[in-house]
Image: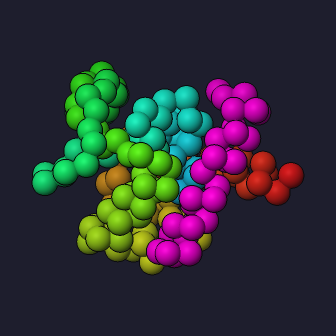
Amino acid sequence: MATTSQIEKFIKTLYPAAVQVEKETGLPALAIIAQSALETGWGASAPGNMYFGFKVPSGWTGKKQLLWTHEYINGVYTRVQDWFCAYDSPIESLRHYAGRIISLSRYATAAKTTDPYQYARELQKAGYATDPNYADKIIKNIDIVKKKSLS
């Protein structure tokens, strides 16, 4: 688990970008920060400003990086290596994330949801990640972000 200072630093780093992305797209900033915290271990692993684990999609012309990660494959937590997107800044990373959520039809319900808790549930329903407890983990982080943001 991250220390209080790591969590506070992470929130301070991403908060302005997440609020800007919320203004631009309507996606809830609290959920964006919380999901990003889950994806990066509160910023402990965010090489190339990669705040979401986006593998390089077909036609990607941006920066990329070869990284190790873990996925559930046939129910087994497995270490794998793959190409992931890299970004010049946090806002670039968050905008790419938001663009994917908005543009992919499987996330249509999530993209229309302003409640951060429901947003997390809709992401999981749409198959965002292979972790069967993904939404619960984001929701736990939403509560942490809310508490730290309001204190």
> Which residue is at 26% across, 28% downward?
66
Q: Quadrant of residue 109?
A: bottom left
Left or right of 61: which side holds 20?
right
Q: Against 7, is 80 above or below?
A: above
Residue 25, how many percent across, how many down?
47, 74
The answer to if 61 sits in the magenta stretch is no
Q: Against 91, is 42 above or below?
A: above
Q: Quadrant of residue 19?
A: bottom right
Left or right of 12: which side holds 21?
left
> Could you tell me how many numbered marks the image carries?
0
> Which residue is at 76% across, 32% downward?
5
Q: Against 54, is 2 above or below?
A: above
Residue 103, how many percent across, how many down?
29, 71
Residue that lies at the very extreme toward the left in this rendered image: 59
Left or right of 23: which side holds 105?
left
The reply to whether residue 87 is visible in this rendering is yes
Q: Quadrant of residue 130?
A: top left
Residue 142, how many percent across, how many down?
64, 53
> Which residue is at 65% across, 27% downward?
1
The answer to if 5 sits in the magenta stretch is yes
In this picture, which residue range is highlighted in magenta?
A: 1-29
What colour scheme has been applied to the protein in the rendered image?
A: rainbow
Q: Against 144, is 24 above or below?
A: below
- Dominant SS of magenta comes to helix
Residue that lies at the very extreme toward the front in this rendered image: 88
> Which residue is at 57% across, 67% downward?
20
The reply to whether residue 113 is visible in this rendering is no
